[in-house]
Image (spheres, rainbow, N blue to C red):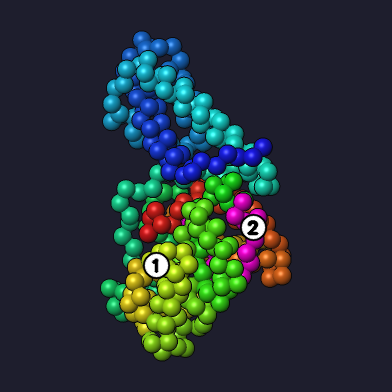
Amino acid sequence: MQLVRQKRPSSVNRINRGVAAVLLAAALGTACAAEGAGPPGTGAAGRHGGQEQGGQERGGQGPQAPQARPRTASGALAAYVERFRREHAARAAAARRWGLRRTPLLPPDPPKVKPEITFRKGFEVGDPSLPPVFTTVPTRDRVVFLTIDDGAEKDPELLRMMSELDIPYSAFLSDYLVKEDYGYFRRMRDLGVALHNHTLTHPYMPALSYAEQKHEICGQQDVIERHYGKRPTLFRPPYGNYDSDTLRAARDCGIKAVPLWTAEAFPDRMEWREWDRDLHPGDIVLTHFRGRGDWKGSMADMVRQAMDTITARGYAVARLEDYV
Ligand SMILES: [Zn+2]
C-alpha cells in the first residue's frame, strides 16, 4: 500500500493533534464533570483514544480545557479517533514496508517560542555574541534531530523512505559534492527539507585565514541561495573543527547558529559523544550522505539503524528548524 502524501503532512498532523488534544480534553472534562451523566462511552473513548496515541498527545490540558457540548465533542472525538487510527495504521504500514522494527514516534507540536540557544560549555571561543556552537537543543520534549552531512551519496531511495515515513531531517551541504547533481537536493528541498551550509570545499577550517574561511562560508551561502532560493541560517564546520575566525566569518555571512552533534549514526551502529552513550532530549544526531562504497550498507540501512535506536529509547525525530 502506498501512503498518500498530503501536501504538508507534518503541519496537518500537528494541527489535527492540537485540535484533537482540545477535543480529548473537552470530552474527558465533560465526562468527569458529569460523573456518568454524559453520553455513554465518551470518557472511555477519550481515554482509549489517548492510549492509542501511545502517549503522544500532550498532557496537562484537561483541567484547563473548556467545557464543550457533549454531543459535538463526542462526535468530533469519534471522527478524530477514527482518523488517528487510520493515520497510525498508515505510519505502521510504512515502517513495516521500510523494514523498521518499530513505528517511529510522532513528535509533539513545535514550541511556540524557540528556545534560546547558547554555547555548549567548553565550546566557547571567548565572544558570547558569536553564533553559538551547541550539540543539544535546550528542550524537555522527548525529541532528537537528524542531520545529514556533505552530499556524496545521492540515493533516490532515501527521499522516498523519509517522505513515506514522514521523518524530518536537515541537510548540511558542501558544494564540491553537491555540484555533481544540484537537482537531487532540489527534490529534497521540495519535500520540505531545509538545506544548510557545510562550506564550499570541506576544508579543516582552523588552518585557514579569516578571509579564506569567509570565502568558504559566504561562497556556500551564495551557492545555496542561487540553486535553492534561500540563504541558510545554520552552519556546520567540517569535522566539527572551528576557531574564533570561523564563527566571526559565519556571523558575517549571516549564520545564526552552529549545530554540532552528540551522536553519529552508521548503518551498523551509533557512535556517542556523551559518557552515558545515550540520547537526551534535544540531542542532535549526525549522519552522512554515504553509500555502500563508504560504509557497511545503504542510506536506508543507516536510517533503519538510527530510527530503531531512537524509537527504542523513546524519542521522536523533530524538525531542527522548528526549534533553532
Ligand atoms: Zn562533512
In the rendered image, residue 113, in percent from the top left (x then y), is placed at: 30, 51
Quadrant where the C terminus sits is: bottom left
In the rendered image, residue 86, in percent from the top left (x then y), is placed at: 56, 31
Quadrant where the N terminus sits is: top right
* Residue at (42, 64) in percent of width and height: 229
Residue pointed to by mark 2 = 156
Q: Which stretch appears magenta?
A: 144-160
Q: Which of 10 and 270 is in front in this view?
A: 10
* Residue at (47, 30) in percent of width and height: 50
User: Secondary structure beneath disc 2?
Assistant: helix
Q: Which of 8 and 186 is in front in this view?
A: 186
Query: Which amino acid type corresponds to the residue marked 1 in the rendered image?
Result: Arg
Tell whether position 173 is magenta.
no
Distance from Cα at disc 2 to Cα at disc 1: 25 Å
Residue pointed to by mark 1 = 231
Left or right, residue 251 beside residue 51: left
Q: Callout 2: few (<14), some (14-19), or many (20+) C-alpha neighbours within 10 Å?
A: few
Label 2 vs 1, first from the N-terminus? 2
Query: Which amino acid type corresponds to the residue marked 2 in the rendered image?
Result: Pro
In the rendered image, residue 148, in percent from the top left (x then y), is placed at: 54, 63
Q: Could one spot residue 190 in this view of the protein?
A: yes
User: Secondary structure beneath disc 1?
Assistant: loop
Find residue 221 and report its image quarter.
Answer: bottom left
Q: Residue 110 carries which label?
A: none
Q: Callout 1: few (<14), some (14-19), or many (20+) C-alpha neighbours within 10 Å?
A: many
